[in-house]
Amino acid sequence: MKKSIFLISFLLIAGYASAQISKGTILAGASSNLGFTSVSPDTGDNYSLFDLNLKGGYFVIDNVVAGANIGYHKLDTYSYSTFGIFGRYYYQGKFFGGVGFNINSYENSDSQTSIPFEVGYAAFINNNIAVEPSLNFSIGEDNNTFGLNVGFALYFNRK
């Protein structure tokens, strides 16, 4: 019985100790939607989108990261680039929610803005590497997108 209480206490303490990402941690990550995004523009026609996103950030306080992102998006023969800023909040150091502001630069067209939202889970392989599946929704000037992304992230200086 004492061993069970000790084991449960140890697991709770260990779980609490890893339940946050400390201020000063640096985030570097990459993600892609792997072709699972469905775009519904104002015209009503749906099509698939491939994208690759890179992001980097700094944990300004425990569990809160602020950073910048760049992305490349391709639709058949059409492509565009994204530049933006983002913020994320981590609950228990694993579940996260975030919001950002992006400027999308299109080929032969004016730039447009979008506001992306994300919720996901940081599944840590070790103390510094995580696989991050997430659901994403973006509100744009001409269309809204919803997708499932899978990313990898490095957490430097994580304690």
Image (cartoon, rainbow, N blue to C red):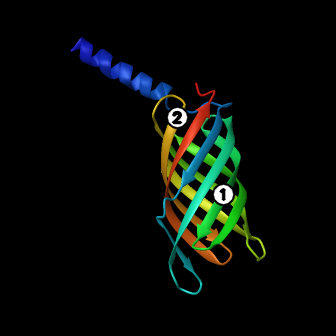
Give coordinates of residue 137: x percent, y percent.
55, 64
Name the foreground residue: 126 vs 144.
126
Work out whether 88 lies above or below 110.
above
Identify which residue is drawn at 58% across, 33% down: 21
Q: Amino acid at mark 2?
A: Ile
- Would you say residue 133 is visible in this rendering? yes
Q: Which element carries disc 1, helix, strand or loop?
A: strand
Q: Left of 95 or right of it: where is 68?
A: right
Name the foreground residue: 55 vs 35.
35
Identify which residue is drawn at 60% across, 44% down: 29
Identify which residue is drawn at 60% across, 52% down: 98
Quadrant containing the N terminus is top left
Q: Amino acid at mark 1?
A: Gly
Where, by quadrant of the figure, is residue 51 drawn? bottom right
Label 2 vs 1, first from the N-terminus:
1
Residue linked to disc 1: 71
Give coordinates of residue 20: x percent, y percent.
54, 33
Identify which residue is drawn at 58% across, 72% down: 75
Work out whether 111 lies above or below 28.
below
Q: Which element carries disc 2, helix, strand or loop?
A: strand
Residue 31 numbered mark, or none: none
Where, by quadrant of the figure, is residue 12 drawn? top left
Q: Left of 11 or right of it: where is 142?
A: right
Give coordinates of residue 43: x percent, y percent.
58, 87
Name the foreground residue: 115 vs 49.
49
**Few, some or many residues within 10 Å of mark 1 (<14, 14–19, 20+):** some
Quadrant containing the C terminus is top right
Residue linked to disc 2: 129
Q: Left of 115 or right of it: where is 95?
A: left
